[in-house]
Amino acid sequence: MDRIKVDKNSKMKQKLRLTGQNLHISDVLGVIAGSTAISFNNAKEKTYKVVRSYLEAESKQKIIYGVNTGFGPMAGHVLAPKQLRRLQYNLIVSHAVGLGEPVNPVFVRAAMLVRLNTLSRGNSGVSAALLKHLGLLINAGVVPIVPEHGAVGTSGDLVQLAHIAACVIGEGKVWYRGKILDAKSVYKRLRIKPYVLKSKEGLALINGTAFMTGVAVVLADKSNRIMDLALRNAAFALEVTSGYSDSLSPQLHALRPHLGQQLVAARLRKLLSKSSLLKTRVKFHEEYSTGEDEEAKIISELLQDVYSLRCIPQILGPVWETLQSHNKTVEVEMNSVTDNPVIVYQQKKIIHGGNFHGEYIAASVDDLKAALVKLTMLSERRTNYLLSQHVNGRFPPFANLARPGFNLGLQGLQFVATSTTAQSQSLAFPHRVHSIPTNADNQDVVSMGSDAALLADKVAQNSFIVLAIELLTLCQLADHLGIGDLVSDSSKELYKLCRRAVPKILEDRPLGAEIDELVSAIQKIDHAK
């Protein structure tokens, strides 16, 4: 994909030239953030024109689904030429009927770019004018309001994408410069006219997986941040508990050479390379010996750490591998042609098929969701270990740094970590198995990919909450132990970030606003470092 720098309003802004084939997750994130603007490959305009002309010529001679016929079970209704443009309008307004709360505008913006990219391939029969119009809306920061409930993810994200398409034709409401406005009023502000759909163009806008894929792109970034924080929390926890270093041994993990397990162990070794707080097995053997007593004896120290400390690479390794698989699936999907029918002009073919089915994304976000739930459970169990004096045998109850009994420390926050984790566990069930036939049984096996993606996002948000509570617990115990100057650079950075949001807790105080600030802060950590 071509990228050039342009000077606009005295600010350098990266320009993303869409080809329909080389869009990356990082590109989408740049557009979402507003640091990247969209342009098109002008050389492809001739291709769009040729494909469009071919489609129009063929539709005058042949019956083509969604071009000169009705939709779904009504595909047997062949329409007159004068009805074809109105048909596309009817398709959009009849499907823009989603209900519920508006979804995160970040998801909508990502979906708009994904849809635009796949149409840019030149296999959907849309005009260059439609592509430019959608690109203009993205560059101008116009974001259609898309309700939560609607699509079943099989003929694509029909309902959610219909709300985006409604904005294209001047219908519905949008976010624009921080306000909710009628789309028509925003067009007046921009001094442009709503787009008038040509035959098939409405179908091309809503028939595909762009919405669920847009959510999946954002989830990829969130999940990478969650994974990075989970690893750094884990390293911090090993320092606070003086965990055994041999659980990270390269020789150990070489004997079970799963890539994720090895990479997680290597990352933890790197994070802890300058720390002097971990215990070595050599030191343990120096302190304890088998002896020659005839009777069994009890030693005062555990021979091995609990699983939430000892098995971090074995638990987070599969999570890392799931993230990598998710990233690959997303990048393939957002560079794919997912509407129907598709035009292969070079071979003079119009092919009717099912590329709109969302099973790939549904499966990927379901797997990702389950992985994030396991990561959340690992964090919550460590928090329980750290806060439970009768379990750890060394720390004050609930990281109470004042007067246990009179002060309650983090007792209330542990309830939040536990209940949030439990909610995620309930959400872990794969949503894609909830296939309910619809559309007069035309759509008889559906993916539920959009809802699966939105549920995965809920799990991701829950992960941040649980990780934030673990981090606060670690900081409290680091203060109790007085090891602030001895921990690794990564743990020092986390400690400072946490304490900016939540100062040391001695006396009980309302913590809600402080925890919200901490959750927000950890979501902004640059995981690329």
Image (spheres, grey):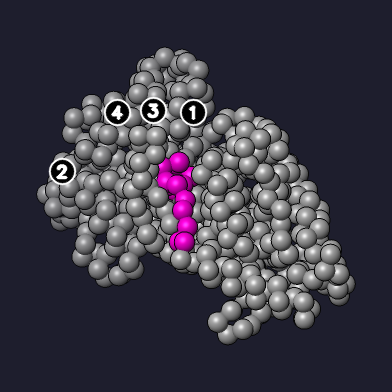
Badge 2: residue crowd in 10 Å (few <14, some 14–19, many ≥20): few
Could you tell me the amino acid type at mark 4?
Answer: Lys
Q: Residue furthest bottom?
A: 347
The image shows residue 403 at horizontal and vertical percentages of: 39, 16
Label 2 – label 1 distance at C-alpha:
31 Å
Which structural element holds mark 3?
helix
Say which of 42 and 509 sits in front.
42
Q: Residue at x 23, y 46 (%)?
A: 271
- Judge whether residue 161 can be spotted in this image: yes
Residue for point 71% across, 57% down: 197
User: In the image, residue 80 lies at what x, y percent?
Assistant: 86, 69
Residue 516's mark? Answer: 1
Q: Which residues are magenta?
A: 29-42
Mark closer to the chain start, 3 or 4: 3
Q: Please say whether residue 425 is visible from this viewpoint.
A: no
Q: Earlier in the sequence, mark 2 or mark 3?
A: 2
Q: Are marks 2 and 1 in contact (CB under 8 Å)?
A: no
Few, some or many residues within 10 Å of mark 4 (<14, 14–19, 20+): some
For badge 2, the amino acid type reads Lys
Q: Position of residue 58 (x, y in %)?
A: 71, 78
- Residue 220 is inside the magenta segment: no
Circle 1 residues within 10 Å: few <14, some 14–19, many ≥20: some
Q: Judging from the image, what secondary structure is the residue with disc 4 in?
A: helix
Q: Does 229 sit left or right of 517 as displayed?
A: left
Q: Are marks 3 and 4 in contact (CB under 8 Å)?
A: no
* Circle 2 residue: 274
Mark number displayed over residue 496: 4
Q: Tell me the residue that label 3 is attached to.
A: 399
Which quadrant does the N terminus fall into?
bottom left
Q: Mark 1 belongs to which amino acid?
A: Asp
Identify which amino acid the numbered label 3 is placed on: Ala
